[in-house]
Amino acid sequence: MLIVLGAATVPAAAAPADPDGIGNQSLREKLDAAASAYNDAKGRLDASRARQGDLQQRLGAAELRLKELDAEVGPIAAAAYRGSRLNVSMVLLDAGPSGVMLHDAATVNYLTQRDDREIRTLAKAKKEYAEQKAALDNEIKLQEQQLAEMDKRKRDAEQALGNPGRGSSLGAGLAATANPAPRNSDGSWPRESCSVKDPTTSGCLTPRTLHALQQAQSAGFDHFTACYRAGGGGEHPRGRACDFAANASGFQNARASGADKAYGDRLAGWLIANSDRLGVLYVIWYKQVWFPGLGWKAYTSGDGTPAGDHYNHVHLSVH
């Protein structure tokens, strides 16, 4: 049997056993829930910060315009408040001949309309400024809520992992090159089902997982990969996870070293660098878990095998 990945054809190999072991389904569920909530909160935070930047620019422009109008309209408004603006009837009584009277009446009418228009313009500018200021305040409150949610979800993940020690940085410094997957207007990720064909197996994937797989392949990561897997816990049966073999020919029953280890490091680093674009929940590689907001954490679960401890493949879970 052959599986085609991008332009490369590689022999199929048996997919690794359930990576975290049968006894760790609860752990995977907790990580999934924590990472999903964290990513949605971060997406909403990023979208809110973008709106905040736009609001601050508009607020600055409105404030400048308000100062200009205050300087122009302030004397007019003050005169109107004191009742010292020209009175049409008084002008007409003192106007004299009818032609002069009509001219003066037109002049007073024009000045009155102009002054009223400028006062209304100032009032509108003040209203718009107040609305934009309120919108900016609301965005700041939203950001505070999302930051609190992110902190909570990071604590949930650490507790689920047993508060593990800090792992070593793997594949650091790679640039984000993937095309972003579509988001909701508020920055969160749309809910997706296992609805598209998995090109690596006979199963299905979510559109976002397929997008992540295709983007990784386009970036040059073309070693043997298996995504959908029936049964067990985690994201594989939901079409939301892929296992990328470190060795080009498949999942070897040995700890990756040399070029294979370097390949896994680069792939893990690339997935992390593009996590915001791909909707990455977490990455597992070389007995470490990368969780958004936490970085790499060493974990103690596993079965002692190269597959169970993720020494021979990079695991990707997608939101």
Image (cartoon, rainbow, N blue to C red):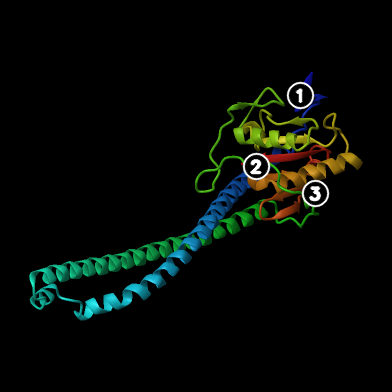
Q: Earlier in the sequence, mark 2 or mark 1?
A: 1
Left or right: 197 with respect to 257? left
Q: Secondary structure at mark 2?
A: helix
Residue 6 sits in quarter = top right
Where residue 266 appears, as percent x and y from the top left, is: 80, 44
Q: Is residue 223 at all visible to an observer of this figure?
A: yes
Where residue 240 appears, as percent x and y from the top left, is: 64, 36
Left or right: 194 with respect to 8? left
Left or right: 285 with respect to 124? right
Quarter occupied by the C terminus: top right
**Residue under numbered circle 2:** 278
Q: Amino acid at mark 1?
A: Val
Where residue 146 appears, as percent x and y from the top left, is: 54, 57
Q: Residue at x 85, y 34 (%)?
A: 247
Q: Is residue 15 above or below residue 91?
A: above
Between 183 and 257, the residue placed more toward the observer is 183
Between 300 and 295, the residue placed more toward the observer is 295
Q: Secondary structure at mark 1?
A: strand
The circle on residue 4 is: 1
Measured in 3D between alpha carbons, the distance from the residue under mark 1 to the one under mark 3, in whole angstroms, is: 26 Å
Measured in 3D between alpha carbons, the distance from the residue under mark 3 to the one under mark 2, in whole angstroms, is: 17 Å
Q: Is residue 104 above or below residue 43?
A: below
